[in-house]
Amino acid sequence: MNEIIAAAQMKDWYVFAGLVLTLIIQIVRKTPKLKNVWEKVPEGARFLIPLITGAAGGFTEAFASGATWQDALLQALMGALGIGMTSMGFAAALTDSPVPWDGGAGGRPRVKQGPRGPLPPPISRGGAGMATLALVLLLSGCGVSWPKVVEHCAPAPEELIDDVSNVLRNDPGPLSDRALDALEELAKKHGPSIIICVVNDIIDALTSKVAASPAEITIVSHGREFLKRTGTKVEP
């Protein structure tokens, strides 16, 4: 369960991606030459477009960063929620805002005439949209939940190994909260399990050396303290 919770972390960029996706969909819907593409999608299935797009973004980012395919699938789900639902929340909120986003200002649609006079306005979607957006923003800001046990560590990119090593090396004295925050930021981007694996691999590599430098001793000490503070162990 801890591994699932750790893997299912939303990324900081999901909210921004949701806003960009909202603008892109609106451009497609309102541009005459692109409008036909949107209208070819059945009305009851158009909500799937932002969800599928968000899921694809979450899966691609996780898989490219070296996550296992199981973790990548979890990130696809979080992408669908964090990007797709955020996009729909933005669209609903803008519809009911003073901006004439999708009709008149304040969510009042442009009056359409029916056979017996003006047609009644549709039901407002703003309340549900704002609630969804608030929930997604709250989840996006959650801290990192470090897993208790990590298995099957995948090879990490050299750039990520360097980033983790620099955090552990440049922290004077005992492992500080600032260094832990820096590692949490890396975990939000690449996944907590990957950071745990990188720290463990760095410790194993440096402790196997015959003569370690003072900087390398500091890295090992901070790495072990990090694993102790997060309560994590790596099993082969």
Image (tube, grey):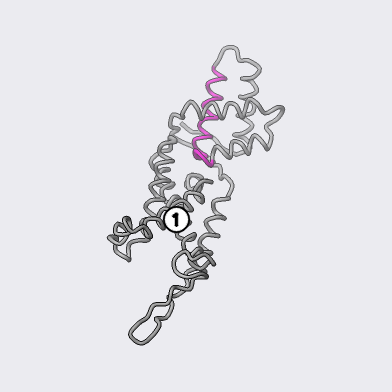
Task: Determine if the magenta segment contains residue 227.
Answer: no
Look at label 1 and name its amino acid. Answer: Thr
Question: What range of the chain is rendered magenta?
Answer: 188-208
Residue 91 screen position, x and y as percent: 46, 61
Residue 30 screen position, x and y as percent: 38, 60
Can residue 1 be seen from the camera position used here?
no
Residue at image location 62% in from the left, 24% down from the top: 219
Residue at image location 48% in from the left, 25% down from the top: 158
User: Would residue 135 appear left or right of 236 to someone viewing this image?
Assistant: right
Q: Farthest residue toward the bottom?
A: 116
- Nearest the viewer among 28 and 55 is 28
Residue 47 screen position, x and y as percent: 37, 61
Would you name the residue on which mark 1 appears? 22
- Could you say which quadrant of the image residue 81 lies in? bottom left
- Nearest the viewer among 220 and 79 is 79
Q: Farthest residue toward the left?
A: 40
In the image, residue 172 above or below residue 17: above
Residue at image location 32% in from the left, 55% down from the top: 34
In the image, residue 12 above or below residue 182: below
Task: Determine if the magenta segment contains residue 205.
Answer: yes
Q: Helix, strand, or loop for circle 1?
A: helix
In the image, residue 24 above or below residue 3: below
Can residue 145 be seen from the camera position used here?
yes
Residue 181 screen position, x and y as percent: 63, 39
User: Would residue 62 appear left or right of 232 to someone viewing this image?
Assistant: left
